[in-house]
């Protein structure tokens, strides 16, 4: 349930209303906007008399939220959420440019890539240390050592780092990771999502291979309900009958999610197609659609990459992509 208050409501009136609602065993979440205050209610609101609320002097209107995702709902939080990661921001007018290798392989590799993508305008560095692979025989990542190398790259370049967490048991190792990524396979790992809801780190939540937008928002709800409001959604392509690309990029997810939710939504063009030569076009499409950022795989030697080399750009290709994407973002935000 959403209660929109009149602009002339006094702090005393708001405090009195909040106290009364909390007395009904309802979770109360005030949201201060530029022009008005909204109070979001979480819990069993079926016993609350809407007409009684609407007749209060300070109440402008009352709306019941029918969708199952409450806290992630734009009705609950009308203004865009902006997630801050160091000096970088993602959401609203802020476009995040995240780049780096699918997997951290060596100190030399991650340092070279980090320096090159930063020079091209990347605002965050991505890199996999723990890799959930389809085959148990594929490279599984350097694990804790990979995280140490990412921290080294962070010190060298100043770029905040993004890395995927695949198990709650590894959470303590992610102390220096700025954004924790939840991969497509873990989108509905609810125990993991609950635990991440208790952290204060930004969470990059990827859409599952065959998950609906509603299911993605419900997974985000698990994190938000735990108290962590810093969630970034990621459309990374869904599995369809098409075989020319690894997955199918659902570009329509951007406007749909932006209508339904206040959370920022970014695009992963690399996993969406799985083919390096298509990544630039999909990145430009993401920027034109109004997405809040992209996350791109970049490798200094894609032909010999230990993971997903076929979809990885060279640093020079990323530099070209970044310049085109920036121009589109400038046009869309002008």
Image (spheres, rainbow, N blue to C red):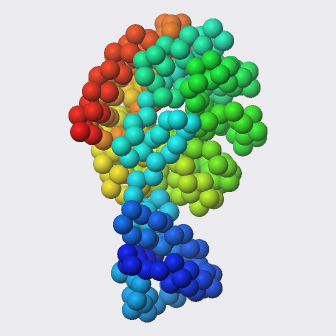
Residue at 46 percent of width and 16 percent of height: 119
Q: Which of the image's four quarters has the N terminus? A: bottom left
Does residue 248 appear anywhere in the picture? yes
Q: Quadrant of residue 227?
A: bottom right
Looking at the picture, tell me which residue is in the foreground, 43 or 229: 229
At x 46%, y 48%, the residue is: 82
The residue that appears at 40% across and 83% down in the rendered structure is 59
Q: Quadrant of residue 90?
A: top left
Q: Quadrant of the C terminus?
A: top left
Residue 268 showing in the rendered view: no
Whole-percent x and y of residue 169? 76, 40
Nearer to the camera, 5 or 9: 9
Image location (x, y in percent) of residue 305? 54, 11
Q: Is residue 137 left or right of residue 251?
A: right
Q: Is residue 314 left or right of residue 201?
A: left
Quadrant for residue 288, please give it. top left
The image shows residue 307 at horizontal and vertical percentages of 55, 18
Residue at 27 percent across and 33 percent down: it is 330
Q: Percent position (x, y) of residue 275? A: 38, 19
Count of labels in the image: 0
């Amino acid at each position: 349930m959403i209660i929109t208050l009149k602009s002339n409501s006094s702090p005393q009136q708001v405090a009195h209303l909040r106290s009364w609602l909390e007395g009904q065993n309802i979770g109360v979440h005030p949201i201060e906007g530029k022009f008005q205050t909204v109070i979001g209610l979480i819990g069993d609101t079926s016993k609350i008399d809407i007409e009684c609320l609407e007749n209060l002097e300070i109440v402008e209107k009352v709306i019941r939220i029918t969708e199952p995702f409450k806290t992630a709902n734009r009705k609950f939080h009308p203004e865009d959420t902006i997630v801050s990661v160091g000096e970088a921001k993602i959401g609203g007018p802020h476009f995040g440019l995240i780049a780096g290798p699918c997997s951290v392989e060596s100190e030399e590799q991650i340092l070279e890539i980090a320096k090159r993508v930063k020079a091209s305008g990347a605002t965050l560095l991505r890199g996999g240390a723990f890799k959930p692979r389809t085959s148990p025989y594929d490279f599984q990542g350097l694990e804790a050592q990979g995280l140490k190398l990412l921290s080294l790259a962070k010190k060298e370049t100043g770029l905040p780092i993004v890395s995927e967490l695949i198990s709650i048991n590894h959470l303590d190792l992610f102390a220096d990771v700025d954004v924790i990524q939840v991969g497509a396979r873990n989108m509905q790992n609810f125990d993991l999502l609950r635990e991440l809801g208790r952290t204060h780190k930004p969470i990059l939540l990827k859409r599952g291979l065959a998950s609906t937008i509603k299911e993605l928002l419900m997974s985000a709800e698990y994190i938000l309900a735990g108290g962590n409001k810093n969630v970034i959604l990621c459309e990374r392509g869904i599995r369809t009958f098409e075989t020319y690309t690894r997955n199918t990029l659902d570009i329509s997810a951007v406007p749909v999610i932006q209508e339904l939710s206040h959370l920022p939504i970014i695009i992963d063009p690399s996993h969406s197609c799985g083919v390096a030569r298509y990544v630039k076009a999909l990145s430009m499409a993401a920027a034109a659609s109004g997405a809040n950022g992209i996350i791109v795989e970049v490798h200094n030697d894609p032909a010999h990459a230990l993971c997903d080399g076929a979809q990885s750009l060279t640093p020079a290709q990323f530099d070209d992509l970044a310049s085109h994407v920036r121009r589109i973002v400038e046009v869309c935000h002008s």
